[in-house]
Amino acid sequence: MNVVDLSHFLEDRMPVFPGSKPVKLDQAACISEEGYHELELHVSTHTGTHIDCASHLIQGGFDTGLASPDRFYGKALVIDCTHLIAPYRIPLEHVKRYEEVLKKTEFVLLHTGWDRYWGKDVYFGEFPVLDPDAASYLAGWPLKGIGIDAAGFDPIDSHDLPVHRIFLSRNIVLVENLTRLADLPEGDFMFCCFPLKIKQGDGSPVRAVGIAKE
Ligand SMILES: [Zn+2]
């Protein structure tokens, strides 16, 4: 079994969405003084590689505490968007090409290659997003989740977050800030993004991985 790590490091002063509080990892104890090492994390539920649950935007939507772990893993498909030229919206015609595979897929991962800008200002600039028509089409399949290797599913200046709403209103998990999608196999593989069991959590940092048979 080959496990591919699709997560960014969670670290002090890591990139965060504009307007979010900086991430802090404080040293609560160290081996030379207390005899053990311990860190204190100060992070938002939407830090780094993370999921959005329906309760992020939808009243009464599922959350990290009540959701069954079954929601967070399943058979996955990568949609290659790397040939599209930024700034762009991933169009309906492109995702429709995957119709045959979508029938037997639980997670769709949008591979844009935008993760190469992680740590640079441009990362939170005009990152690629799904066209709302393409989002509605994908949300019509019985998916558990959809992920992207960029900062989010709606443009940085969006207030009403239409693409987030299309998926979250159907209880489809969103996975943001993925990385290394190019390292996944083309064929069948499993995707996992288990959140912390945060009571009434609207999201959670995750260790996202792809698991291939070979
Ligand atoms: Zn989020």
Image (spheres, helix red, strand yellow):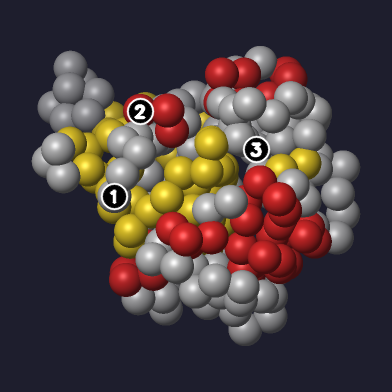
- Tell me the crowding category of disc 2: few under 14, some 14 to 19, or many 20 or more residues within 10 angstroms, Cα based: few
Q: Is mark 2 within 8 Å of ligand 1?
A: no
| Identity, as a three-letter code, of the amino acid under mark 2 | Asp
Residue visible at 46% across and 44% down in the picture: 78
Residue 144 in the image: state x and y as whole percent.
Answer: 46, 67
Which labelled disc corresponds to residue 188? 1
**Contact? badges 2 and 1 (CB < 8 Å):** no
Residue 206 in the image: state x and y as whole percent.
Answer: 40, 48
Q: In the drawing, does residue 46 fall left or right of residue 9? A: right
Give the foreground label among 2 and 3.
2
Which quadrant is home to the N terminus?
Answer: top left
Residue 199 in the image: state x and y as whole percent.
Answer: 45, 71
Q: Which residue is mark 3?
A: 151
Q: Is mark 1 within 8 Å of ligand 1?
A: no
Of the two numbered discs 1 and 3 on the same chain, state the one appearing first in sequence.
3
- Of the pair 40 and 180, the residue shown nearer to us: 180
Q: Which residue is mark 2?
A: 183
Which quadrant is home to the C terminus?
Answer: top left
Residue visible at 24% across and 24% down in the picture: 30
The answer to whether residue 65 is above or below residue 209 is below
Q: Residue furthest bottom?
A: 60
Disc 3 is placed on an element classified as: loop
Residue visible at 74% across and 25% down in the picture: 85
